Image: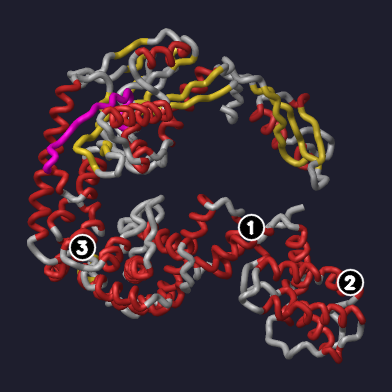
Amino acid sequence: LDRERLSYSSISTGATPRRISIHIESLISRQNDVTREARGPPAKAAFDSSGKMTKAAEGFCRAQGVGIEDTFTRADSKGVDYLFVKVLEKGRSTAEILANVIPSILESISFGRTMRWNSSNVTFSRPVRWILALYGSKSIPFTFSGVHSSNETRGLRGPSGSAPSIPLSSAAEYQLSIQNLGVILSEDDRKNLIIREVSRIASSVGGFIAPQFLETSDESLVSEVTNLVENPVPILGTFDKDFLKLPPEVLITVMKKHQRYFPVQSDDKKLLNFFVTVANGPVNEKVVVVGNESVLRARYTDAVFFYEKDLSKKLEDFVPNLTGLTFQEKLGSMLDKQNRVAKAADALGSFMGISQVAANALHAASSIFKADLVTSLVVEFTALAGSMGRHYALKQGYSNEVADTIFEHVLPRSSGDALPSSEAGIALAISDRLDSLVGLFAVGLAPKATSDPFALRRAALGIVQTLSLRRIDLDLTDAVALVAELQPVAVSEEARKSVVEFVVRRMEAWMVESTGHRIDIIRSGLAVKGSNPAVALGVIEELSAISEDEEFKRALDVLDRAGRLLKSNSEVNGDFLEIDTSLFENEEENRLYTSWCDVADVISFSGTPTEEVVRALARMKPDVDSFFDNVFVMAEDDKIRKNRLLLTRTIAQAVDSRFDHRLIQRTS
């Protein structure tokens, strides 16, 4: 609208599973007229020696639709005279513009998945069935995906599956008409209604809906259900109490992931034999309940069969079957992967300095942690991987530590999921993800911009969150090198670096999205410490805490001024001898060197907090300014010049082992 010079007061949008709406208030009826200047040929080419217009100038006038008398000359920013004209562009009608613009807007909408459904060859998320396009009381005529726009919308589908067409006489009627049809256009309104009603219904049977199912994040159950219905109608259902003998995670997975039901829990957080489903629009509730209960009964009956079948064998008895589950053609079976990860986890556990108790749990878990992938229940319900491994391990007498390690190796499974918390679980989770990243990068299967079939971005994010938020001091360069040696294929140095860079990029994206730290400070810390996420996070947090302090700004001034000559002087690229105080010719040199010596130990000690380092540098500012104001660094004498450059380089690189100060934006 702005590009087409169409002013308006406000824009509101809405979306349901069956419609996308844009409502524009106070949209003007036509473009405003506008006068623009057009530049033609240079004046020296526009006029001949006698002052008459050349063919070039005449052609320019014809192209702009003006006469020769409408031209004038003016110098540009470089002082060159050009021929100019002023051209009046008459505004077009809004309806005409929208008829041309709307199809291109529709074509530009991107979706994670698209489809084609007719000869128009247009791609969209779902088939387009109707297009309502009105400006006031006038229809805006255009065609998209083989569908002609009109003044008609549609309501909810009836029992026959079809929806009646409803004509509108003006755009102003739309909101009320949609409301009368029972469609709740606002996603937030639908979501709030669902939360309120499913909670009320659960309360009516003495239960409640667990908070994780009612979170408003994009991946939550309530968000998914909200975008499956236009008119939410929550309904209570029940199932046989005998099914409660199944593990709670099985019951919940079937209800949540496969049926999109809300599980009902008691006050002591035990599952009740109730669920809440959400129908779309007015329905025969008895018929809907019977149908939903029947589907759930069938799934739970299958789950009981699979569960009892799995319990008839020990967890370790499933391990040989992992050979039949391919991880990747060149990287072997899932058993091969389990064996590699077991070796890597043992070594990483040593790097991390885990306790002997944790090491014992890690050793026991690492021989069976993938076994549940070939159990009947997990084959049927893949989301239960890890959960059922823990459950079966406990059933078969393994310790809580071993069982928790098996479960925690899959964490986090999605955004917002819990992180592994035990030492053994962290070591196994990191090793498993690094094995996937290193191996798949080595065989050329790194994620592409639009494709990540092995979920490596999620694996990298899991590594970042676990190491940084659990404050695990682990350098990924060393860890990747360790894992690379265990791969069945050669892992090039380039692939190893690419893995580390990939993880660092994921950390940057995650921190920008969720931590609130300034992007320049994030990049400053990651540029130096990115291969160690826990240390990088610590540095970034320290920098953020002092980024607005005057001392921080003075410290940056010190680093900037000391490093200014180094950018363009090749003499500082080599290794110099130590600073030679006998070559000092000025008191300013002595004062600056003394000032540096006073703080050097504080700055160079890796355990010194960044805030103290910054304060130490800030104290040097008067001596740094005095040095550069009164001392000519680039002296003719070779030894004196290099000695001064060495002094400035020493100061300029004072924090290079902590963060890259050059990436931090200077604020006034």
Q: Secondary structure at mark 1?
A: helix
Amino acid carrying label 3: it is: Leu
Q: Which residue lies under the disc numbered 1?
A: 544
Q: Which residue is mark 3?
A: 394
Give how far apart the Cα atoms at labels 3 and 2 are: 71 Å
* Badge 3 or badge 2: first in the primary sequence: 3
Q: What is the x, y in percent for residue 143?
A: 37, 23
Determine whether, in the image, residue 216 is placed left or right of residue 55.
left
Under circle 3, the secondary element is helix
Quadrant including the N terminus: top right
Picture residue at 35% right of the left edge, 14% below the top: 152
Residue 661 in sight in this render: yes
In screen coordinates, is 477 left or right of 365? right
Q: Earlier in the sequence, mark 3 or mark 1?
A: 3
- In percent of width and height, residue 576 lies at 72, 88
Q: CA distance from mark 2 to mark 1?
A: 29 Å
Q: Magenta segment, which residues?
A: 228-242
Label of residue 626 in the image: 2
Q: Quadrant of residue 186?
A: top left
Towards the viewer: 228 or 495 = 228
- Tell me if label 2 and label 1 are in contact, CB under 8 Å: no
Does label 2 or label 1 sit earlier along the sequence? 1
Q: Label 2 amino acid? A: Ser
